[in-house]
Structures are given as structure tokens and as C-alpha cells.
């Protein structure tokens, strides 16, 4: 067993790292201001250099990297919040979902332009009036009326809805079914009458097109159903599991960047007659960050390996979602502490990174839900006299 980046992956990983550090990161001020021309230029450069949509299947026009290989690439792509956009991988979860479940018409209308980057997707599951940690409480409903679905409900944190061509909406379609078979996914073009964006909700003061949306008698063709009726949760679980690993690998890229900034600051800043790197307490920051990053990285690779081997990896993914988000928050927090007052300003990327990191402990399932789920599943191995064999997972 080795934890080194495979030789077959190293060239493309190095190319992505260079693209991120030499072009994306320097362009962040413009990208933060919403400069669409700069983003489009980066996307065109990525396409020309063969770095576009690397994790998408080759038959869809992507790079065709296997799952585990893409995980290593995603680690360096995650150095910037704009890496996904510049390299065309922000559509990966939606593309894989459509690739498996979309009809022929849906593939032509949505999937092909999605992979090219011609349109943007959005996904609506979270609702403001119910606890989203228990998705069986979702209230948005869809009723089949002749040849159309009629959707009524209220969603928020539908990321990208304000610029998306469509939204995949999780809604209740089978009111008499068991909770996890009561929901379906329906594709709704964002220009459909009754689809109203109430606002873009800032997250800790940052924009990000996290939209609150009302659905008032929204009518779409019955053919807009994605997959089978009542199978919304099955589709969502397949979407969310790998997506959480992608999050965790991008968080490692962010943590690496914060770690680099912190260590360089420790060498370049002098206090009381010597570099900060000479101070024992500052070295404690380095030690704690090193161990947390490395622990989270190995846990993430283990989870990715389990998924690649065909496991649902519910325990591994739940654990790394919590550990990864905490790690990222802690490492960035220490880097800010090392920078002092400068770390609180936009003079470094740390202030934006810190706010995004805090949000990571909530989206895609809050820490408490994953902790409870992992604990319950591990304890379940002991109910019949068994045990949890770490080496066999």
C-alpha cells in the first residue's frame, strides 16, 4: 500500500497545480468581483490545455479520469474556490446524476451542454421551514395533472439558481409511500412561470448565488421526471456520497494553501528580535496543522478507495465529512492567528477561506447528523457479537 500520488496521475495533477497557482489564484480578485470575462478566459485556456472537466466520463466529452485518480487532482484544484468553475468540474455531480438517470431528451437538453460548460445546473433540496438534517420532512410537493407536474413549495440554498438553466427539485410525489420512497426528482427550467427567486442569501457576508426560491403552481411536462417515481432519495444518496469526498479533497487543497501561507509568514515575520518560526508556540500551530491535515488526507483517501472498490462507504464518508470540515476550519484559523491583524483583512485569501470553512460544517449534512450516523453504524456491528475491524474496511 502506498499513499503517494500514482505516477500515472502525477503529470495531470502537476498541470492542474500550475494552472491553479499561476492563473486562477492571481485572478481571484477579479473573480470575487464577478468578472465573467476573466472566468470565461480561464475556462477556454483549460479546454485548450486538456484540463477541462477531467472527472467527467470521456463519452460525455470529459477527461475520463477514474474516480480515485480524480480525487488526487481535486486535491490541488481545491486550492481556490474558483478552481471548479475554471476547470469545468463544478457540474460533475449533476452530470454523473444525469448520465445515470436521464432520458434521451433530458441528456440532449441538459447533459451535453452541461459538460461543455454552456449552461449551469442547480439542485434544490433544502427548505427554510423544516430541519434539513431530516430530509423526510421536505414539504415541497408535485402532483401529476394530466401530462404535467404541478409543483408548489419553498426552497433555499439552491446554489447557482440565479444563473442556472434548470433546477433539479426534490419534491414529495408519493404521499402514501414510506418516507424514503415518497420523493422524486423533477427537472425544472428556471424560466418556468411560477419559479421565483426571492433573493440570493449571503453566507457569513459572502455572496455565492445561494438562492431562496418559491414554486407556485410551477408546471413542467411529466417527461421532466428524473429516474423513477419515488426514487429521489436513492438518486440523492448516489449524488451526495462521492460529492462529499470531492468536498473533502478540495478542503485539503484549501488547507495546504493556508498551511503554506502560515509557514511562510512564520519565516518572514520578526517579533522580539527573531523570526516567528523560532517561537515554540508558533511551532505548535505547525504541528497541530500538520497532523490534522495528514490525518484528514489519509481518511479521505481511505473513503475514496472504499467507494472505488464498490462500497457505499457510509461510515467512511460520514467520518471524513466531519473531520475534514473541522480540519479546514482549524488550519485556516491558525494561519489567521499567525498573520495577526492582516489575517482579518482581504490582503490575504484567508478571510474568505475562513468563512467558507465554517459553512462546511453545515452543508451536505451538519456534523451532528454524520456523527450520529457513524456512531450508530459502528455500534451496529457489535449487536450480534461482532466487532468493527478497521483493517478490513
Image (cartoon, grey):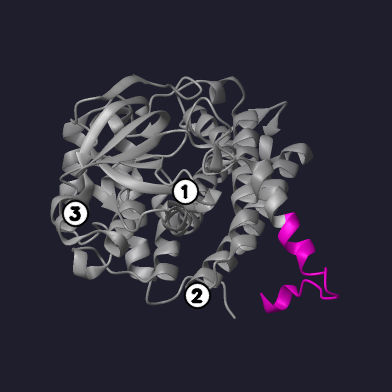
Q: Which of marks 2 and 3 is nearer the N terminus?
A: 3
Can I make out residue 88 in this image? no
Residue name at image x 32 percent, y 34 percent: 151
Q: Nearer the viewer's eye, disc 2 or disc 1? A: 1
Q: Which of marks 2 and 1 is nearer the N terminus?
A: 1
Image spot of residue 388 (x, y percent): 77, 71
Decide: marks 2, 1 in contact (CB < 8 A)?
no
179 relative to 165, above or below:
below
Which is nearer the eye, 106 or 252? Answer: 106
- Region of the chain picked out in magenta, as a range: 375-393
Residue bearing the label numbered 3: 106
Which is nearer the eye, 213 or 180? Answer: 180
Q: Which of marks 3 and 1 is nearer the N terminus?
A: 3
**Quarter of the image where one finds residue 318:** bottom right
Q: In this view, does 328 lie to the left or right of 229?
A: right
Which is nearer the eye, 385 or 95? Answer: 385
Which is nearer the eye, 300 or 4? Answer: 300
Q: Nearer the viewer's eye, disc 3 or disc 1? A: 1
Residue name at image x 51 percent, y 69 percent: 307
Judged from the image, the secondary structure of the residue bearing numbered disc 3 is helix
Quadrant where the N terminus sits is bottom right
Judged from the image, the secondary structure of the residue bearing numbered disc 1 is loop
Residue name at image x 41 percent, y 30 percent: 155
Residue bearing the label numbered 2: 310
Residue 182's tag is 1
Image spot of residue 102 (x, y percent): 25, 58
Amino acid at each position: 500500500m502506498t499513499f503517494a500520488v500514482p505516477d500515472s496521475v502525477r503529470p495531470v495533477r502537476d498541470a492542474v497545480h500550475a494552472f491553479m497557482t499561476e492563473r486562477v489564484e492571481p485572478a481571484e480578485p477579479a473573480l470575487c468581483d464577478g468578472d465573467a470575462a476573466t472566468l470565461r478566459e480561464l475556462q477556454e485556456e483549460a479546454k485548450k490545455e486538456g484540463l477541462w472537466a477531467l472527472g467527467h466520463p470521456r463519452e460525455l466529452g470529459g477527461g475520463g479520469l477514474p474516480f480515485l485518480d480524480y480525487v488526487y487532482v481535486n486535491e490541488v484544484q481545491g486550492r481556490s474556490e474558483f478552481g471548479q468553475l475554471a476547470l469545468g468540474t463544478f457540474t460533475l455531480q449533476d452530470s454523473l446524476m444525469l448520465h445515470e438517470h436521464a432520458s434521451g431528451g433530458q441528456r440532449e437538453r441538459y447533459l451535453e451542454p452541461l459538460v461543455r460548460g454552456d449552461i449551469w445546473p442547480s439542485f434544490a433540496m433544502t427548505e427554510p421551514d423544516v430541519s434539513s438534517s431530516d430530509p423526510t420532512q421536505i414539504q415541497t410537493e408535485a402532483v401529476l395533472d394530466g401530462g404535467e407536474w404541478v409543483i408548489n413549495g419553498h426552497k433555499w440554498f439552491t446554489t447557482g439558481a440565479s444563473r442556472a438553466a434548470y433546477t433539479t427539485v426534490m419534491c414529495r410525489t408519493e404521499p402514501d409511500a414510506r418516507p424514503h420512497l415518497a420523493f422524486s426528482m423533477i427537472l425544472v427550467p428556471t424560466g418556468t412561470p411560477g419559479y421565483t427567486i426571492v433573493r440570493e442569501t449571503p453566507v457569513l457576508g459572502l455572496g455565492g448565488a445561494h438562492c431562496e426560491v418559491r414554486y407556485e403552481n410551477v408546471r413542467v411536462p411529466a417527461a421532466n421526471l428524473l429516474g423513477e417515481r419515488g426514487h429521489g432519495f436513492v438518486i440523492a444518496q448516489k449524488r451526495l456520497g462521492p460529492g462529499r469526498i470531492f468536498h473533502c479533497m478540495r478542503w485539503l487543497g484549501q488547507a495546504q494553501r493556508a498551511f503554506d501561507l502560515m509557514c511562510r509568514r512564520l519565516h518572514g515575520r520578526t517579533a522580539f528580535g527573531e523570526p516567528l518560526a523560532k517561537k515554540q508556540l508558533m511551532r505548535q500551530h505547525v504541528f497541530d496543522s500538520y497532523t490534522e491535515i495528514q490525518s484528514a488526507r489519509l481518511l479521505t483517501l481511505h473513503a475514496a478507495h472504499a467507494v472505488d472498490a464498490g462500497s457505499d462507504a457510509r461510515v467512511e464518508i460520514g467520518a471524513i465529512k466531519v473531520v475534514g470540515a473541522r480540519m479546514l476550519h482549524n488550519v485556516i484559523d491558525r494561519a489567521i492567528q499567525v498573520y495577526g491583524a492582516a489575517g482579518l483583512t482581504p490582503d490575504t485569501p484567508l478571510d474568505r477561506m475562513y468563512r467558507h470553512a465554517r459553512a462546511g460544517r453545515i452543508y451536505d449534512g451538519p456534523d451532528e447528523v454524520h456523527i450520529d450516523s457513524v456512531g450508530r453504524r459502528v455500534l451496529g456491528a457489535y449487536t450480534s457479537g461482532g466487532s468493527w475491524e478497521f483493517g478490513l474496511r
